[in-house]
Amino acid sequence: MNNHSPTCLVILAGGQSIRMGTDKAVITLAGQRLIDILIDRFTSKADQLLLSAPEDYGTGLAFIRDNPDFPGGPVGGIFSVAAILQKTRPDIAGFVTVPVDAPHAPVDLIARLSASGTCTVAGDRQRIHPTFAYWRCDIVDNIRITHDHRQKSPSLRWLAERCGAKSVIWLDDNLFMNINRPQDLIEADHNKTADA
């Protein structure tokens, strides 16, 4: 592993937000947009902050759109980010991903997931959470090149397995809560108040 590789966090904000009914990146929690909560949470933790999204949402951050030739869904986003970084930032060995709808994401996410230098997925006592992961650009790129794109869009669990991803466990299950429906927003607001 290159110990001098810059740390990179990618906020996954390219989903369709079907269950929520509106773009989750701009939903507000305690008066702040979800995307801004994550930016504030991780700006000091990463050397490079990027969005996997169709736009920058007024943040001024660089964003990477999904390549239309890649599979749909979050795997397509991760394939797109890895391919772009391989070309434009070869000094960045890999990147940590966090979904835009996870306002309680652990602040030590980048440090713990990228520590081993190999692909790693976050988990709690119940299950793994492959949207919270460290992806090595070279490994992801090799999988993308050999993947038959005519097949159904693969899942992040599929990608984690193909990458041989290890798991890192956190004991607090609430850290990985996703806001998928309006009632989740109410619960997240309660948890944010309790954390304050």
Image (cartoon, rainbow, N blue to C red):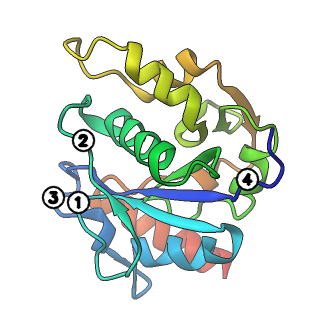
Which amino acid, mark 3? Gly
Residue 103 in view (yes/no) = no
Marks 2 and 1: in contact by CB < 8 Å? no
In this rendering, position of residue 63 left or right of residue 41? left
Compute the Cα span from label 3 to label 2.
Answer: 24 Å
Snapshot quadrant of residue 60: bottom left
Circle 3 sits on which residue? 21
- Mark 1 or 3 closer to N-term? 3
Q: Which of marks 4 and 1 is nearer the N terminus?
A: 4
Circles 4 and 2, Cβ within 8 Å, touching? The answer is no
Residue type for callout 4: Ser
Residue 23 in picture, x, y percent from top left: 22, 64
Quote the CA–CA distance across marks 4 and 2. 25 Å
- Residue, x 61% and y 44% (percent of image)? 94
- Identify the image quadrant of residue 58: bottom left
Residue 27 lies, with reference to residue 116, above or below; the image says: below
Q: Name the residue under label 1.
A: 54
Q: Nearer the viewer, mark 1 or mark 3?
A: 1
Image location of residue 21, percent across then percent down: 15, 58
Question: Label 4 belongs to which residue?
Answer: 5
